[in-house]
Image (cartoon, rainbow, N blue to C red):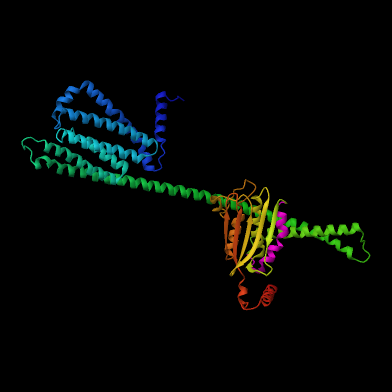
Amino acid sequence: MKSASPCATLWQRLNAWLHQVPISDPVDRRNAVFMQWLLAFQGLRTPLMKVYLLANEWPYMTATFFDKTVSGPTVSIAVDLGTDLAISASAWLGFYLIRVGQFRRAVKQFLATQLSCGVLAYGAFGYKVTPGDMILLITLALGGLMLGRRALWAIYVTILLVIATGMTTDYLHSSGGSHTFFDAYRDLVFRTFSYALITIILDRSIGALREALSESDTHRRQLQHEMAERERTQEQLLHSQKMDAIGRLSQGVAHDFNNVLGIVLGFSQERYRIDEPGADRSPDALALAQALQGVEMAARRADAITRKLLNFSRHDTTNIETFDAAEAVSGLEPMLRQLFPASVRVVLSTPDTPLLIDFDQSQFELAILNIASNARDAMPDGGQFEVTLSTNQDSIILALVDSGIGMPEEVRARIFDPFFTTKPAGRGTGVGLTVVYNLVTLGGGDITVLSRPGKGTTFRVRLPQSRRLAGVSAEADGLAKHSALSSVWATT
């Protein structure tokens, strides 16, 4: 393979440099490359051509042009050199402005300079001796293409003003009244309609191009969005299938583990033999019985966890029941203390009166454990996890507060999205909080999250109180109300 020539390499680098402009608008960014070339060409062409004319064609220029202007050669030469200098400086200023990202400002000042110089030139030279209107046509097309319809029509009006200025100069300097007012301005009508036709054509063409580009850009963004959604959906499907397989596997493991726990519980029942007549009640036997009691308590706790795992992995239908949320939260205290390390202080605050809700108790506990698991990961150096239960009109409010690292707003806004997780691979699946959100909303409640980096996180869960409370008289005293609630709880 042949390597690129130095000229080709230099050209590629120059072209890449011209494309590197900090311009956000896609149309302006595309036009910026062409405008840089045009401004650089104009900034070089104007002074170089003037130097050539001064060195080689000056007598001819003076005889055929400057001597025939209405203002005389001295004024005409000064205006000619001054306008060329202004246009060259404006071209390089525009080039600089594009490089710093101010595309429209660059084009506007360049076109304004050209039109201002046109007014001066036509005013000094007159309309009849001015060599053509090619620069005016280029200005008209450039303004429409780069700045849009409003600039196009503004330039059209300004061009008519430029031409009228030259005609006025001719009329004012006409000798002996050889030119009437009609003779001086009769070409203005023709110029008005001819430039109007050109402007209308440019307007329609530019509008069609911009509309086509806008539609193309819209379709491109829509296609990118659809592709991203498809990739996200496919990723979620694959993750869901993986989680389903893990759920089936965990169901089998939990079932077998539950059988082993049954054997452990069976052996732990042997501690009751110490209560039989004639049993050995020595200190060692009592210590062994106490140890077996601890084994039984741990095994029953593990049994409760595996049963929750079995219920969850089997996708059983929700078992709505009426239970006391305060009692359920208090019953979770041993699990929560085992879930958190010793460096985390667990605080539970529940009212003494029952707070009845219609919910699946196992799912209610699962939701609390899921949030607690996230709180544990948010406090690697220790802290405090607080669970508070209270009432608000016909609802219960469950607040779970940790003093962890918190999260930024962009993370907080997505924590309930399926499979969204900030944990490293192998540490999180992104489904725990999604499950919590679905459980709460299906139960007729809502959940909000407050968090700031370094300020901890608060989950606020609102659930409606049990409908069975509607039959309790609002005028009953505290004792009668407590009795009625106990009666309701007993029937469930």
| Residue 112 visible to the viewer | yes
The percent coordinates of residue 486 (x first, y second) are 69, 74
The percent coordinates of residue 283 (x first, y second) are 91, 58
| Residue 65 visible to the viewer | no
Residue 360 against residue 427 in the figure, above or below: below
Residue 428 against residue 267 in the figure, above or below: above
Q: Is residue 280 left or right of residue 483?
A: right
Residue 387 against residue 31 in the figure, above or below: below
Q: Is residue 330 magenta?
A: yes
**Of the pair 78 and 298, the residue shown nearer to us:** 78
| Res 300 quadrant in image | bottom right
The C terminus lies in which quarter of the figure? bottom right
The percent coordinates of residue 187 (x first, y second) are 13, 41
**Of the pair 462 and 169, the residue shown nearer to us:** 169
Residue 404 against residue 77 in the figure, above or below: below
Q: Is residue 212 magenta?
A: no
The percent coordinates of residue 437 (x first, y second) are 58, 59
| Res 392 quadrant in image | bottom right
Residue farthest to the right? 278
Residue at position x 74%, y 55% in the image:
257
**Of the pair 459 and 201, the residue shown nearer to us:** 459
Which range is magenta?
318-341
Q: How many marks?
A: 0
Q: Is residue 388 left or right of residue 286?
A: left
| Res 260 quadrant in image | bottom right
